[in-house]
Amino acid sequence: MSACDDLLHPHPHVALLPSAGMGHLTPFLRLATQLVHHHCNVTLITTHPIVSLSESKLITHFLAAFPQVNQVKFNLLPLDHTTANSTDPFFLHFETIRRSAHLLSPLLASLSPPLHALVCDVTLISSVIPVTESLHLPNYILFTSSAKMLSFFSYFHIHASKAGDDYPAMLGDVEIPGLPSIPRSSIPPLLLIPNNLFANIFKVDSPKVTKSNGVLINTFEGLEALSLELLNGGKVVEGMPPVIAVGPLMPCDFEKGELGNNQLKWLNEQPVGSVVYVSFGSRTVISRDQIREIGHGLIRSGCRFLWVVKDKKVDKEDEEGLEEVVGRELMESLKAKGLVVKNWVDQGEILGHKAVGGFVSHCGWNSVIEAAWHGVPILAWPQHGDQKINAEVVESSRLGMWVTSWGWGEKDMVKGDEFGERIREMMGSELLRGQATHIKEEARKALGDGGSCEMTFKRLVAEWKMKS
Ligand code: UDP
Ligand code: UDP
């Protein structure tokens, strides 16, 4: 673009509307840094009250690092919980935003300079699209999971309609045109329970994806070429808007700073590739019995380890001491070979540390992308939600391995011996290491100078500019 074009079409102004949870907020903030880098004016809409402490902290760190980003606080209407069919604080927050969405209209209209686009979270689609439509404002979705999950999500209403009145009892394996069948056992468990909030939102939103102007997604060709091709070729559902791969959205500097000195010192002392990192993300609770089995398994594996224990879904409530949760005796044995912590860690720094050679992960999508970015093989242990569908991506790309017989972590117990055995298998696999390194190279290529990300953002920004 020439200087003259720049005058005619000033930098686009884009508003971002995340929903709740680190798994949603983090990719939004990483997207915001990319948009700033590509000379967009960015407004970040933060919804209040904020559910977790880690979200509040991350927003503060982000705004301190990017003072040019405009923050708009969106105070939500109180939600009558008895009308929402869920006890999950994050899902309740999705619903609170959805029911307050009409208040967005004056807020968006009042922003100056006028907006070129709104990017909203995937969990808000059907309540936000009518608002942007009425303002004639282009609407983009940030899909915070895999392209495979996006295929599942956008096809789901068609699949559910096949079961008719017998939904969800008669929901079968999911046959998405062009993709390997997704077995019923991989369907997010809440979709198989009648009338819960998650399923209700999912079902209403699924057919509405086609109403948006585009879906931004944190993935890249080198990881999910087939799903991206099918989605963009209109093979999954008719009328799919452009699916725009903006990944990998990788960890940024503003996220740094929570890796305690003793963790870093300990990692620095370990041989290259010798440590297995064990973490199940920001909002997954592991039962006390399973925690004990994990502890025994880690000892049994003979590997060094860094294990993050989480005892409550929302960090503010996670107050019990590590010894109480893991057990004093087990803690003593664990200390010989590894580190066990019960606080927020800087996962980006851990996965990027040369001592780390493997990752036991629930396969939250951000974790998968971060492992890909650092070329760390994954042992997939899906716990709930989209995680089996993501684990399938991990397995088929050979970024890692998935023991399907382990079932859903939140429901089925895995014995320590078995867990330890599989860790040994992952940590000893040259094949997985080689493939993870290859995927890392693809990720770096996508994000490098002249790579697919740069091209994609340039195209997107040019498109927004032309609409001004
Ligand atoms: N995370 C982190 N430290 C922790 C726990 C999680 O940095 O102690 C980050 C992790 O790097 C990822 C995000 O939180 O960026 C979790 O998102 P993911 O999609 O992996 O899982 P979720 O928490 O949504 O289940
Ligand atoms: N999801 C969706 N629409 C919804 C709710 C969820 O597409 O209305 C998908 C989305 O991919 C999300 C995944 O289901 O990342 C899991 O959702 P959840 O909020 O349980 O997990 P989180 O991403 O917070 O770990």
Image (cartoon, grey):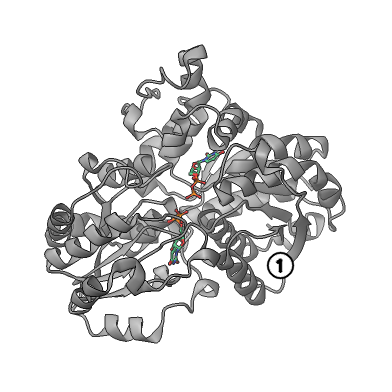
For badge 1, the amino acid type reads: Val
Specify whether 436 is left or right of 131.
left
| Residue 266 placement (x, y as % from top left) | 28, 83
Q: In which quarter of the image is the N terminus?
A: bottom right
Q: In this view, does 56 lie above or below 154?
A: below
Q: In this view, does 91 lie above or below 196?
A: below
Q: Quadrant of residue 86?
A: top right
| Residue 468 placement (x, y as % from top left) | 79, 48
Q: In which quarter of the image is residue 113?
A: bottom right
The residue under the point 36% across, 25% down is: 178
Helix, strand or loop under label 1: loop
Q: Is residue 381 above or below residue 160?
A: below
Q: Ligand 1 within 8 A of label 1's CB?
A: no
Please state the total of marks drawn on the protein image. Answer: 1
Q: Mark 1 points at which residue?
A: 69
The answer to which of 267 and 376 lies nearer the viewer is 267
Specify whether 92 is left or right of 342.
right
Count neighbours of disc 1 (C-alpha within 10 A) and say few if under 14, some if 14 to 19, many if 20 or more.
Answer: some
The residue under the point 51% across, 51% down is: 246
Can residue 438 be seen in this snapshot?
Answer: no
The residue under the point 43% across, 44% down is: 146
Can residue 279 be seen in this snapshot?
Answer: yes
| Residue 329 placement (x, y as % from top left) | 22, 73
The answer to which of 396 and 242 lies nearer the viewer is 396
| Residue 427 placement (x, y as % from top left) | 16, 62
Specify whether 295 is left or right of 36.
left
